[in-house]
Image (tube, grey):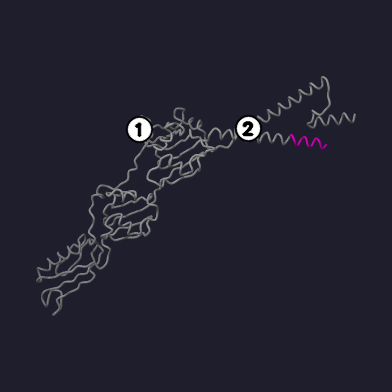
Amino acid sequence: MMAASHEARHSQRGAPCTVPVSGRNAVTFASTCRRGARTGLCLALVLLLSACATLPQVGPNKRQILAGSVERQGNAFVVDVDDQVAKNAQIELRLGFPPEFISAQPLAADIIFPGDTLGLTVWENVDSGLFGNAGANQTVLQEMQVDGDGFIFVPYAGRLRAAEKTPEALRQIITRKLEEQTPDPQVEVRRLAGDGAAVSLTGAVAGQGVYPIERPTRRLSGMIAAAGGLAIKPEVALVTVIRGSKRGQVWFEDLQSKPKADIALHAGDRIVVEEDPRRYTVLGAAGTQASVPFESETLNVLEALARVGGLSGAASNPRGVFVMRDEPERVARRVLQRSDLRGSQRMIYVLNLVEPNGLFLARDFEIRDADTIYVTEAPFAQWSKVIRALTGTLGAVGSVSTASSTLSGDL
């Protein structure tokens, strides 16, 4: 009785196959073992399927993205990129100066402006002249400031307009006025203080400040050089000139390659140098997920991916590279060949890099400011996760079985 009781207890503790049985009881016992094995396998599969449903992902797969298309009641147009689409989706970044900036002539370096302080010397050809004491024929008039309206006052000549004139032109005017009252006067006009025509220079330059327009700095490139040059890389530098209520902007490198961009400066111009603010975002199974600055005037998909390390050989799906953006109405109409669209449209451009023309299309498709590049995971990457989940599940089941057997053997 004690032996039978021990065997029964041993059977209940998970080791039924060690019980000596024979005949009809042996068949029944084997059937029970098979049912137990099938139950354990089913349990493992249920656990595996549960794990698959919650496998980690870098983002949606290609099928899930395509499910959001307008054709499937989504809110984005999904477009496969071909040569025509790549061409129609291009937008030229229009930078430049207004025509009046380009046609303006360089200022003379010695133009007089309101606020300047002038010095005036008059020589008279008589012993007792209009300005001098007896026996003196030279008179020096110091610190004659040009008022806000651009005028100065000269005794015996009256109120004269000095602004926007050179010292030589003003000298001739004063001489003609004084000739009416003293014979053959000789006049000298000097600028004692004030920068005359000046511009302000701010932003990414070595020396910000207010600079006079002199002979070497009459044009934009010369003025930037006078301020110590750029404090950022030339290929990402944008130069803005503000003149009154108008403004224009060019790439710094255009000042060397396009002569018309190197405009003549005028008094009061404001020059701002800044780094290109454009950025794009890379997500998914790319080399790196990041927000990336352009660092060049133009950028295509291949260049954009290369800057983040390209595609991941172990995880990326080259058949599922997407470019997502809000497309302006005129571009969306051109790409989709539709005239009924109103306002900007959400667009998803699909690139398949393994097609014969795929890499060329990626090279020709331009990236724009605020674009998102999304790379889907390769199917193999998902299967690898399934296999790892399966291996982990079976390992856990094996660990439980081993522990159970150990405990049973100890009792």
Residue 152 located left or right of residue 18: left
State the residue position of label 2.
Answer: 50
Q: Which amino acid, by three-letter code, is at mark 1?
A: Arg
Q: Position of residue 112 (x, y in %)?
A: 23, 62
Question: Which residues lie in the magenta part?
Answer: 401-411
Q: Looking at the image, which is closer to me, 69 or 81?
A: 81
- Identify the disc placed on residue 276: none
Residue bearing the label numbered 1:
334
Residue reaching furthest to the front: 356
Q: Nearer the viewer, residue 141 or 125?
A: 125
Q: Secondary structure at mark 2?
A: helix
Depth order, front residue of 403/244: 403
Q: Identify which residue is drawn at 39% across, 39% down.
A: 366
Q: In whole angstroms, how far apart are the C-alphas of marks 1 and 2?
A: 46 Å
Q: Please, is residue 88 above or below residue 205 in the view?
A: above
Which residue is most to the right? 1
Discs 1, 2 touching: Cβ within 8 Å: no
User: Per the image, is 404 magenta?
Assistant: yes
Which image quadrant: the N terminus? top right
Q: Quadrant of the C terminus?
A: top right
